[in-house]
Image (cartoon, helix red, strand yellow):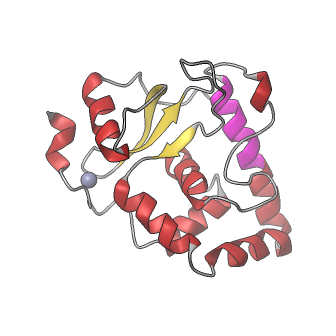
Amino acid sequence: MTTPPFAPPTHAEIAVVSAQLGRQARGVVGIAARCVCGNPTVVATSPRLDDGSPFPTFYYLTHPAATAAMSTLEATQVMPELAALLADDEDVAAAYRTAHEAYLHDRAQFGEVPEIDGISAGGMPTRVKCLHALAGHALAAGPGVNPIGDAALERSSWSPERCQCEDPGAATR
Ligand SMILES: [Zn+2]
């Protein structure tokens, strides 16, 4: 496994992420995935924030259209459907455990934090609890790493290949 392939964020990128979140982005160590237009869709966040608090969700979905799409999916029957997939398919379950390990490995590049040792995000390695976190990981890692995140994105109305940014020019200013 390799170090996550992203550079430290620029001030302009932090500004775009803060606008997406509607608050100042905290602890961002890189842009882990982008829209086809170049705007951030997922940020990587330090496992320990500047105020000292532990932050397990290394890959955090920031894009407003993406987060809305995942909230819509969570409100449907998709959660129990994906949980059943995990329970019934040993290959999926094994891949999900591997995704959990990959997530922890990626995060550990930015520091070991005892409070969240072995804790990843989204319900990994055995449950499906947050599609935002799982889709964020799937977008950052690329297809074939997080099977539940991939499945959530496949069922989603949102895709990074079709720009739904409210202000696509924001990334370049
Ligand atoms: Zn876009």
Vertical arrangement, residue 162 with respect to residue 51, above or below: below
Residue closer to the observer: 86 or 26: 26
Vertical arrangement, residue 134 with respect to residue 18, above or below: below
State which quarter of the image contains the N terminus. Answer: top right
Magenta highlight on residue 105 = yes
State which quarter of the image contains the C terminus. Answer: top left
Percent coordinates x, y for residue 17 in the rendering: 34, 39
- Seen at 28% across and 38% down, the residue is 16
- Seen at 52% across and 43% down, the residue is 60
Span colored in magenta: 98-108
Magenta highlight on residue 14 = no
Percent coordinates x, y for residue 152 in the rendering: 56, 67
* Quarter assignment of residue 164: bottom left
Is residue 145 toward the left or the right of residue 163 in the image? right
Magenta span: predominant SS is: helix
- Seen at 63% across and 32% down, the residue is 55
Outermost residue to the bottom: 77
* Quarter assignment of residue 127: bottom right
* Quarter assignment of residue 53: top right
Is residue 51 toward the left or the right of residue 116 in the image? left
Residue closer to the observer: 112 or 51: 51
Vertical arrangement, residue 26 with respect to residue 93, above or below: above
Task: Using the rendered image of the protein, determine whether residue 1 is visible from the camera's viewpoint.
Answer: no
Percent coordinates x, y for residue 124 in the rendering: 75, 52
Residue closer to the observer: 107 or 161: 107
Count how many numbered circles sit on residues in the image: 0
Percent coordinates x, y for residue 165 in the rendering: 25, 55
- Seen at 70% across and 39% down, the residue is 102
